Image: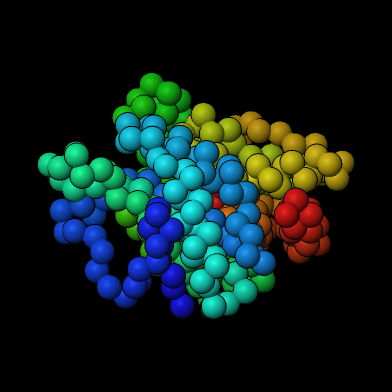
Amino acid sequence: MRVLAFLDGKLADPEAAHLRVDDLGLLRGDGVFETILVTGEKPRELRPHLDRLARSAAMLELPEPDLEGFERAARAVIDHWTGGREIALKLVYTRGIDGDPAGGPTAFAVGLEIDEKVQRARAEGVAAVLLERGFAPDVAERAPWLLLGAKTVSYAVNMAALREAGRRGADDVIFTAADGSVLEGPTSTVVIAKGRTLYTPPSSVGILPGTTQHALFRGAEKAGWTVKVEPLEAADLTTADGVFLASSVRLVTRVHTLDGAPLPDSAALHRELVEIYESEY
Ligand code: PLP
């Protein structure tokens, strides 16, 4: 099941061709996107996702996105969905046609089923490997053209890292910076628990500010946890009571194995954090 809508709220056939072959999103990965989880017909953290779409677009110097149009398209997808209980709702915004700036950006929303792999990761947790990302944690500010922290459609590196994890017998990746500090997953934010404190690295190290992590920390604070956004070393992962990967569609999944070595059993902690995240819904 998939449902496609454009910003005027009109539906289109998701099996038909709608993009031109010279769309810069396709030719150069020159565009941005968001993936939002819809449950019970409600898009979760919609405003933070729309704000981040606008922020990513600004980093790429794209025209300001029509957020009302994106909301309209999202609503059209949700209203016409007849598939599973949840929707992975993607908002896509590219620079449009090469050499035709007057043509304007390409923009659409598409609803997709949740991958079976994601369902399994939610239930069983994942084995992750540390892979180097190759940049220093202070480069994001010095070199904004690297677009670190923008959610661009150029995810080829992220997907390659996941294939490398597969080759190493793992399911997912935690990227490290050139100094060995913790960055993020290819499609997730890293959260660790130590005692009653949750930690995540700051987006200033060149990572995407996660909407799921943000909502989780909001809920955790209300539930009496301390939350800290500060740089993490790889060693913090192995000494933590729990390591988690958070993202909109996977929610909060636990990492049970890191680089082939089992981590402490965090199943009870995981249940607690999932409950906290759900309480923010
Ligand atoms: N970091 C990266 C690189 C991502 O691609 C994602 C989501 O896909 C996240 C973090 C988590 O963001 P969110 O919780 O807003 O889905």
The residue at 58%/60% (across/down) is 37
The residue at 59%/36% (across/down) is 201
Between 69 and 204, the one lying in front of the other is 69
Figure quadrant of the C terminus: bottom right
Asked which quadrant contains residue 144, the reply is top left
Q: Is residue 167 above or below residue 264?
A: below
Between 58 and 119, the one lying in front of the other is 58
Q: Is residue 182 left or right of residue 17?
A: right
Q: Is residue 91 visible?
A: yes
User: Residue 230: horizontal and vertical position, in percent?
Assistant: 64, 31
User: Residue 181: horizontal and vertical position, in percent?
Assistant: 53, 36
The residue at 58%/33% (across/down) is 202
Between 245 and 64, the one lying in front of the other is 64
Q: Is residue 217 left or right of residue 88?
A: right
Q: Residue furthest left?
A: 99
Q: Is residue 6 above or below residue 232?
A: below
Asked which quadrant contains residue 232, the reply is top right
Q: Residue furthest top?
A: 142
Asked which quadrant contains residue 261, the reply is bottom right
Q: Is residue 4 left or right of residue 183?
A: left
Q: Is residue 81 above or below residue 30?
A: below
User: Residue 66: horizontal and vertical position, in percent?
Assistant: 42, 42
